[in-house]
Amino acid sequence: MAGNTSKFSHFWILLLCMLSGLTVGYFIGGLCSEISFLKWLNDTGTFGLDQPFQVNLGVIWFSFQVKFNITLTAVIGLLLGIFLYKKIV
């Protein structure tokens, strides 16, 4: 049982490192967009659902839409987050 808890906690540490890396990457990308020769680091690739997926069941109605904006600095931050995870664990 202790082995499963350890794997479960490692998953959350990895997720935290990846999300931290993405956040720092987006922040650095925003700073780079202000500098003329570094604007290319903040070029965005967008993918996902343009129109929300909607379901109306009469009693309940919901809408679902997912859209991702990926920048080069976010990917670099994500990779650095994974590298940090490998160093921690």
Image: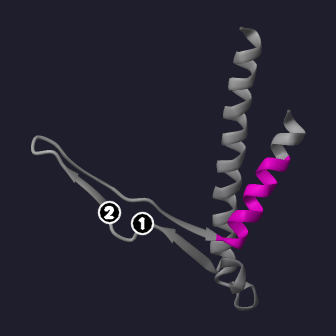
The residue singled out by tag 1 in the image is: 49
Q: Residues within 10 Å of mark 2 (few under 14, many from 20)?
A: few
Amino acid on which disc 1 is placed: Leu
Q: Which colour scheme appears in the figure? A: one colour
Examine the rendered structure and indicate whether residue 76 appears above or below residue 4. below
Residue 6 magenta-highlighted: no
Residue 35 versus residue 74 in the image, above or below: below
Question: What secondary structure is marked by label 2?
Answer: loop
Where does residue 34 sit, x and y in percent of width and height?
64, 83
Residue situated in front as seen by the camera: 7 or 20: 7
What numbered label is drawn on residue 52? 2
Outermost residue, right direction? 87
The answer to whether residue 54 is left or right of residue 88 is left
* Tag 1–tag 2 contact (CB < 8 Å): yes
Q: Residue at x 42, y 66 (%)?
A: 49
Q: Position of residue 45 (x, y in %)?
A: 59, 76
Write the residue at 70% across / 48% down: 18
Q: CA distance from mark 1 to mark 2?
A: 6 Å
Residue 54 occupies quadrant: bottom left
The magenta span reads 71-83
Please tell me which residue is depicted at 74% across the width and 60% down the height of the picture.
77
Q: Position of residue 65 (x, y in %)?
A: 38, 59
Going by the numbered disc 2, the residue's amino acid type is Pro
Q: Which mark is residue 14?
A: none
Foreground pick, 64 / 28: 64
